[in-house]
Amino acid sequence: MPKNIQRIGVITSPTGAAIRDVLHVLARRDPSIEVVIYPTQVQGANADINICQAINIANQRLEVDVLLLTRGGGSLEDLWCFNSEALAQTIYNSALPIVSAVGHEVDTTISDYVADIRAPTPSAGAELLSQDSDNKTQKLAMALSRLAQSAKHYQLKQERRLSLLEHLLQRQDPKRSLQQFEQRFDEMQLRLESALSNRLHLLSRRQQLLTSRLEQQSPKHKLVIEANRLSYLASRLQDALQDKQSQSEQRIKYAAHQLETVSPLATLSRGYSITTDVHNQVIDCTDNVAIGDSVQTRLRHGQLISTVTQITLLE
């Protein structure tokens, strides 16, 4: 649908109430809109053919921005021509946009479905295609405001351009060029002095580095390093010997403890004794002695010599 509608084509009966309503609404809302009426029969036999001819004429002339197909309310029979298949195809194939405003709000025809927009009444169709004059006034005020802003923007742009030109003119002044040359000369002199100072500092550091490297390569310096290394190795050897001795002492103590654990003397210290015959053979069974034999009993401290007077078997 076009946004700025300047001319509307109305397809309707020139004597019906619909055209009066449309013209009244357009005159009230936007008198600047031009109206072209394509008179046609909107009721009765062959009305759909006449309406199709009016639409085709409007498409041939292309003198309007949009078409308003309208008529007032009526019975189903009165509106039946707007249900015609031929009319529906003509509306669908129209190059001009068509607004269908047939009957009242409750009336619906096939033309309403194939049209670009449906309006419930002829007056509503006219309102849809027109703008309120107050809205135009508001748009005009907005346009004037934008124009004022554009003029202000253009003025500011020209002022900035003038300021830039004045600045460029000042830069072309010979006195300013001489001042810039003197300033550049001073800057180059400072950069030269800084470069010389940095170069001397670099050479001084390089000399110090070479002197330090030369001192590190001297025999005296190497002797000091080797002496320190020998002292470090001797200290590590001494520590290793002490660790080795400590480990050996620990192993000896552990072995003595283990030996003491399995020693017969340790058993005697807990109250036990060892009995042997005259040949120093340990007696661990009564079968190895007889009554009257002499036996020796080893205690924790000292030993006893006894004569066997009785043998008792224990279960």
Image (spheres, rainbow, N blue to C red):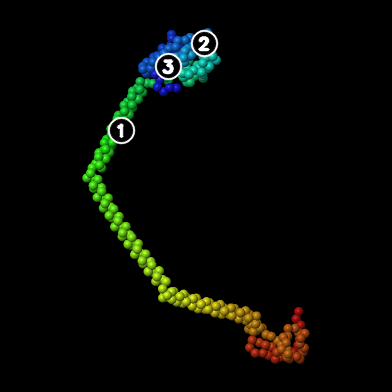
Position above or below: 137 against 233: above
Looking at the rendered structure, the secondary structure element under dot 1 is helix
Kind of residue at disc 2: Ile
> Which residue shows up at 66% across the image and 87% down it?
299
Q: Which residue is mark 3?
A: 64
- Which kind of residue does numbered mark 1 sit on? His
Q: Are marks 3 and 2 in contact (CB under 8 Å)?
A: no
Task: Please give the count of numbered marks on the rendered protein.
Answer: 3
- Disc on the earlier residue, 2 or 1: 2
Against 198, residue 215 (above or below) is below
Foreground tag (3 vs 2): 3
Q: Residues within 10 Å of mark 2 (few under 14, many from 20)?
A: some
**Residue 48: image location, x then y, percent:** 51, 11
SS at badge 3: loop
Q: CA distance from mark 1 to mark 3?
A: 38 Å
- Residue 118 pos. (x, y %): 48, 19
Q: In what quadrant of the picture does the N terminus appear? A: top left
> Reading the chain from its start, which is encountered first: label 3 or label 2?
2
Q: Residues within 10 Å of mark 3 (few under 14, many from 20)?
A: some
Residue visible at 76% across and 87% down?
289
> What is the three-letter code of the residue carrying label 3?
Val
Residue at mark 1 = 153
On the image, the x and y values in percent for residue 45 come to 53, 8
Q: Are marks 2 and 1 in contact (CB under 8 Å)?
A: no
